[in-house]
Amino acid sequence: MRLKTGIFLLTIFSLILAASFVDARILRIKKDEVEAYEKADTGSVVIDKLYKNEIYGIVEQKPGGWYKLKLYGNNLGWVHVQDVVLKGAKIAQPEAQKTILNLNTLYSKSYAVIIAIDEYINMEPLNYALRDAAYLKRELRTLGFRNIIEYYNEKATIENITDLFERELMKKVKENDRVFIFIASRSVSKEIAPNIFEGYILPYDADNDKFGETTFSIDVLDVFFAKLAAKHVLVVYDTSISGLSLKKAVSIPQSRPGYMLTVTSAKGRQVITAGKAGHSITFLDSGISLFISTLVEGMNGSAEQGIPDGIVTGSELGAYLKLKVSIKSVRAQTPDFGRVQGGDRGGEFIFTRRRGQLQVTQEIKASRGPDVSPEEEFLQEISPEEAEEQAVIEGDRQQAPLDDEDLEDYEVAGPLPLFPGELVVIPAGDFQMGSKRGHINERPVHIVFVDSYYIGRYEVTNKEYKEFIDATGYPPPVNVEGLDSDYNFWDGRTYPTEIENQPVVNVSWYDAIAYCKWLSQATGENYRLPTEAEWEKAARGTDQRIYPWGNRKPTRMHSNYNREWDGPIRTIFNVGSLAKGKSPYWVYDMSGNVWEWCSNWYKTDYYEKSARSNPKGPKEGVSKSVRGGSWASDDNLIRSAARYGYYPDLRSSRGGFRIVLEPEK
């Protein structure tokens, strides 16, 4: 009898447990870092790492507490129940979940600490610290910093600053606060081993004869900031210094599920410096340093990257400063940035002028199933008439040019709201390259693995290209037809202001390579043109979509294509003008407007022998690959898989380029 009762109870328990599995369709990662496995076994291959507060859809469950999830990049992986929090959601197919982020309660209090020292007891004075501090203070107030603590000159002694960090801030600052710390002072970087430095900040009473007792080592300051209870701390050193133990700043892709919730809730400790040891401080005619001017510009929105949300993160600000200051100072000064001890992976200091609520979307997508292609899925969702029209994708459809009055609805007038030179991280992984529907040069369709890389959100603009030719004396763009061609838009080394934010055209492959080499030298980074594989993955993602925006046929809201020439202002669009045409990684203008040079040689049959991992193209050839189509292309040539070849010395009004940055190894 007991045995039967036990079996009965076990059966009931199993049914209840099974019911709970069915009811829980999504889950949240509860640990800082969780490994996802290829199989429901901790001894199997780790295929991805998941991070705290990210949310995923459950595809399958197995006994023993294992859950199979739809991961970032369309991968599937197993996690254990001990690493997650189940979320009850009675939905058969999980869809995008929207969460409201209240910007008014993002922080309880916002503190700014400003330490600026021009005068010293035992050293030569500086001539910019107080001026930079005053300029910055004004902007901080407009950004919501109501609690500003100021230490200038004689107040900024070793004793006072120590008391501030060890006692006053420890008492004031609470868990949901943010603290912005600005230090403009003299600094010393001591080389203790080849290319290994210790950095020191010098207060008002610093004394070389008592160096260890009267200075702050960077390591000691890092400990102070790590101990603060604050959610987010950002330290800005308005001085050139080395010896910081900086970790890589860009850690979680913005397109990753739960990105915004992770960066705003995880603890963050970040540092930005004006330059490294030996770099000179560059000043503007106003007397303000280039670094501070660019810092304020970035905090006010120019550094914003990714999904346009009115928010600037500490990492975005650091990347913006590193690129812009380095270029404007002709590499005399290159800021540095990163994370330091005391923070969680992903935590970001947040600047915003916005108030109220921000709707944040976390993608929680269930598996579509192996037997349904994205094209078939799309055709199932639309009417028979639309399906019949979409099934013919041969490129012979013609669309009437847009009327003049309608054109104003699609173009962006005036300066761009986003930083044109910004980069987007494309995560490592497989994707399907090529198309069965396209030209023979797009076949065979094959799986390609590409390492992680950064790609320009927009093509290089006329404004950016002018910085290059002004800095180097390189010749300006000239069409292949010569100086008298109607397709020339530059007048010598200048251009009409109306085309400033258009992609630069009339540049050869060699010109694009020269730009990348200059940018690499100016910034100390490794910039280049994308390979065909990198370009196609950034354009179509991992779901085999036909166009960057999906599978629906293009309209003038998606792409600038199939157009007759009517002068540069009316024919070529500003970069970023057509938001509906962006790719799944929020990369713009990868369909139409201008063809884009790729790094590799072009051959029709290359896909028959392409490498499985990081293909670099043929070893030799006559033409270089171009991708994306142009303002003159039909809808067949603006597909993401469409490929073509140009002679590398061709300069055409239909061709431009975008850049790729290789991440540090």
Image: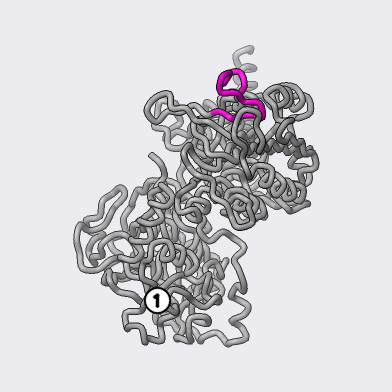
Residue located beneath label 1 in the image? 654
Taking the view exactly as shown, the residue that stands out farthest to the top is 2
- Residue 364 point in image, percent of width and height: 58, 47
* Residue 659: image location, x then y, percent: 41, 58
Left or right: residue 448 compared with residue 338: left
Q: Quadrant of the N terminus?
A: top right
- Res 250 visible: no
The residue located at (73%, 26%) in the rendering is 164
Quadrant housing residue 413: bottom right
- Identify the residue at image location x=66%, y=44%: 350
* Crowding near the residue tagged with mark 1, few <14, some 14–19, many ≥20 C-alpha atoms within 10 Å: many
Viewer-proximal residue, 18 or 494?
494
571 is higher (above) or lower (below) than 134: below
Q: Is residue 205 left or right of residue 638?
A: right
Amino acid at dot 1: Arg
Classify the position of the C terminus by image quarter. Answer: top left
Secondary element at tag 1:
loop
* Residue 659 in the figure: left or right of residue 293: left
**Between residues 418 and 283, which one lies in front from this camera angle?**
283
Residue 450 screen position, x and y as percent = 36, 49
Point 73% across, 34% down: residue: 151
Taking the spot 52% from the left edge, 78% from the top edge, the residue there is: 496
Q: Where is 256 relative to 161, above or below?
A: below
Q: x, y percentage for residue 537?
A: 41, 56
Whether residue 210 is in magenta: the answer is yes
Asked whether residue 526 is drawn in magenta, I would say no
Q: Quadrant of residue 217?
A: top right
Q: Is residue 269 above or below residue 554?
A: above
Horizontally, residue 535 falls left or right of residue 399, namely left
Please give the range of residues in magenta.
Answer: 200-214
